[in-house]
Image (cartoon, helix red, strand yellow):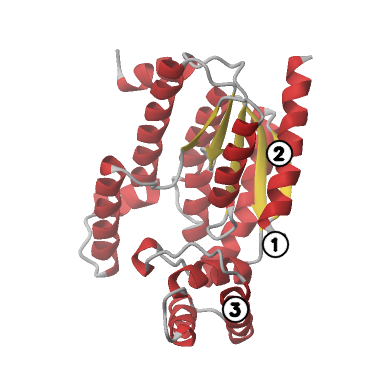
Amino acid sequence: MSDIERQNTELEAIPNNIPFFAFEGMGGSGKSHIIRALESEIAQDGFITASYKISGMGTGERTDWLRKIKEYRTHLISTGEASEKQIQDAQKDRIFMLGMKHQMRKMMTEIRERGNLQLILLDRTPLMPWVYSISTEDNSPFLGDILRKGIDYAKKLHIDTQYLFDISPETAYARMIARICTNSPRPEEVIERVCNQIGAPSDSADTIRAKTLHLLDENHTIVPKSAEGYSFISFKTMINERKYFMQAANILSAECGTRLVVVNAELQPEEITSTIYKDIKGRMVERAT
């Protein structure tokens, strides 16, 4: 059996009566925080659930290894030392696709082994690699292939609903910067450094600074994160991602029949969690009748 045939068999082995609820959006939009809160709420109501990251790099021995390869390849491309194959692999987004394949297989194996899950929360969708690719290089000749593979994966999952977290780039950056500034005696220096690094326009940099300082002053529940834990993409790329996440969500709806709910991620986490959980419970009732 070929790798493709084995991959299709693994995906088809998942019962399509288990609803998948996917969460998508830019870094800093709060997806992971809301998923953790929802898992707790869902468990308290007696549903058996699990969450899985299925796109992006994630963490783990295999994905950490892939991330190092990607970082080294990016370095070679930036210095002009990359081979033609390395440049082409970057355009094909092979690292992201390999990471997603590994995450999907791991998830499918665990779902089959547990056998008692009633609903599943997905951190991202299989179209994330396309969003990443088109946001950074919209003239890549491989975008069509990346999108097609993402759609094929999504069709196998039978995703019930996608919650798209929409947020301004300024708020997203402010949340990420605040997490690396929680223990910093000079947060303004960190804010300025990151704003310069991402190439934020002056008015956006001012907004990011004000939002970050407000979060540090008012929010005492910020979970600290090391600066190494973030790879700050450029401001231009973040703007592109916001646009293409919306486009990808509409493609997912058209191609796979996935229901789309756009979430105002500027709201307080408690309000977002409550609204989404009410929606999930409503979907579960509909499926049971």
Task: Name the amino acid, label 1.
Answer: Glu
Looking at the image, is mark 2 or mark 1 earlier in the sequence?
Answer: 1
Q: Secondary structure at mark 3?
A: helix
Q: Is residue 151 above or below residue 189?
A: above
The numbered mark at residue 266 is 1
Q: CA distance from mark 3 to mark 1?
A: 18 Å
Residue at image position (25%, 54%) is 68
Task: Name the amino acid, label 2.
Answer: Tyr
Q: Is residue 170 above or below residue 283?
A: below
Q: Quadrant of residue 258?
A: top right
Q: Secondary structure at mark 2?
A: helix
Camera-side residue of 49 and 111: 49
Q: Dot 3 corresponds to which residue?
A: 217
Quarter of the image for the C terminus: give it. top right
Question: Within 10 angstroms of label 2, few (less than 14), some, or many (20 or more) residues?
Answer: some
Left or right of residue 50, residue 4 in this image: left
The numbered mark at residue 277 is 2
Which mark's residue is nearer the viewer, 2 or 3?
3
Residue 194: percent from left, percent from top: 45, 78
Residue 160: percent from left, percent from top: 66, 29
Left or right of residue 35, residue 82 in this image: left
Question: Within 10 angstroms of label 1, few (less than 14), some, or many (20 or more) residues?
Answer: some
Q: Is residue 77 above or below residue 64?
A: below
Question: Within 10 angstroms of label 3, few (less than 14), some, or many (20 or more) residues?
Answer: few
Q: Is residue 198 above or below residue 47?
A: below
Q: CA distance from mark 2 to mark 3?
A: 29 Å
Which mark's residue is nearer the viewer, 3 or 1?
3
Q: Secondary structure at mark 1?
A: loop
